[in-house]
Amino acid sequence: MDWNKWHDKYEQQPALQARLNLVAERIAEGLLEKSVEAVVSSLCCGDARDLVLALGRTGWESAQLQGQLVELDPTLVASARQALAPFHALGHFQVQCADATRYETYRDFALADVFILSGVLGNVPTHCYGDLAQSLGQLCHTGALLIWTRSLDERNNGPEAVGTARQSFHDAGFEEIELSRTADGGFAVATARYTAPPRPRRDLGTMFEFQAFEGNAERKAQA
Ligand SMILES: C[S@@+](CC[C@H](N)C(=O)[O-])C[C@H]1O[C@@H](n2cnc3c(N)ncnc32)[C@H](O)[C@@H]1O
């Protein structure tokens, strides 16, 4: 899968644009509730356009944010770094070119106040959702806001996968706040609050499986 090219879909598919808007709105809400100091993490961040849009919406001119973003594709890492550069007055944003599926990647991560998991679950087998949700408990402060998305496309097992995700996050200590659907019904965008104490860190091994969802041309934009 050419993930750099995949990002062109944002210009072509209103459903993805709608998802992006919702995600950015939720990130901005999460950041604003933390005042000006917050740690924000993003896993498989792509070109970070959701965080960039959210930062523009806070209205902040200065803040003490710490951004911890992970992305495997070097071109997208470069794009994310470039897109975040104008926000240097708001804090320090580090975009790691690394494998998000490995615990090792998170060794130096601070606990997050806002955690972005956008466009990821559609590429993760549902049998991994439970472990992934538990792992996020190692990376979040109590009270952290998690934003996750999932395609609702039935051909990608959408409605059932959303149900599995909700249950998995609930079981891992994430209390759901809101689950919205984009107007076209294409994506679920959920927010949940981490209510448990941070779990002991694992720092070796596989956290979850990422299997790029590749279907027909129409389905390739789903994630
Ligand atoms: C569907 S895109 C979502 C991008 C972004 N989060 C968004 O919502 O626009 C999935 C992203 O996961 C990245 N990715 C795939 N496998 C990865 C891995 N093992 N570690 C980190 N990133 C990965 C891809 O390069 C791609 O940017």
Image (tube, rainbow, N blue to C red):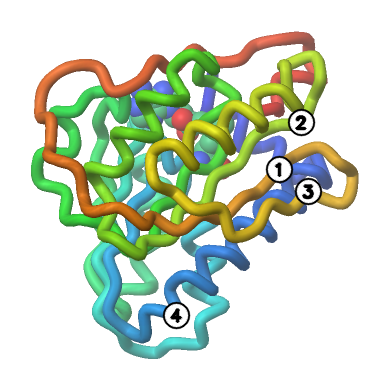
Q: Position of residue 17 (x, y in %)?
A: 74, 50
Q: Is residue 56 visible?
A: yes
Give the distance between the C-alpha atoms of the residues marked 3 and 2, in whole angstroms: 9 Å
Question: Does 152 sit left or right of 26 as displayed?
Answer: right
**199 or 151, which lies in front?**
199
Distance of label 1 from label 4 (alpha carbons): 22 Å
Going from N to C along the chain, the mark reached first, 1 or 3, is: 3
Q: To which residue does mark 2 refer?
A: 152
164 displayed left or right of 169: right
Which residue, given by chain and number where applicable, does mark 1 sit on? 188
Q: Do the residues labelled 3 and 2 touch (CB within 8 Å)?
A: yes
Residue at position x 54%, y 73% from top? 29
Q: Does the residue labelled 2 lie within 8 Å of ligand 1?
A: no
Badges 1 and 3: C-beta atoms under 8 Å apart?
yes
The quarter of the picture where residue 153 lies is top right
Tag 2 secondary structure: loop
| Marker disc for residue 181 | 3
Q: What element carries label 1?
A: strand
Which of the numbered marks, if any, corresponds to residue 33? 4
Q: What residue type is labelled 2?
A: Leu
Report, in whole angstroms, how far the alpha carbon at label 2 lies from the one at label 1: 6 Å
Q: Who comes first in sequence, dot 2 or dot 1? A: 2
CB under 8 Å between discs 2 and 1: yes
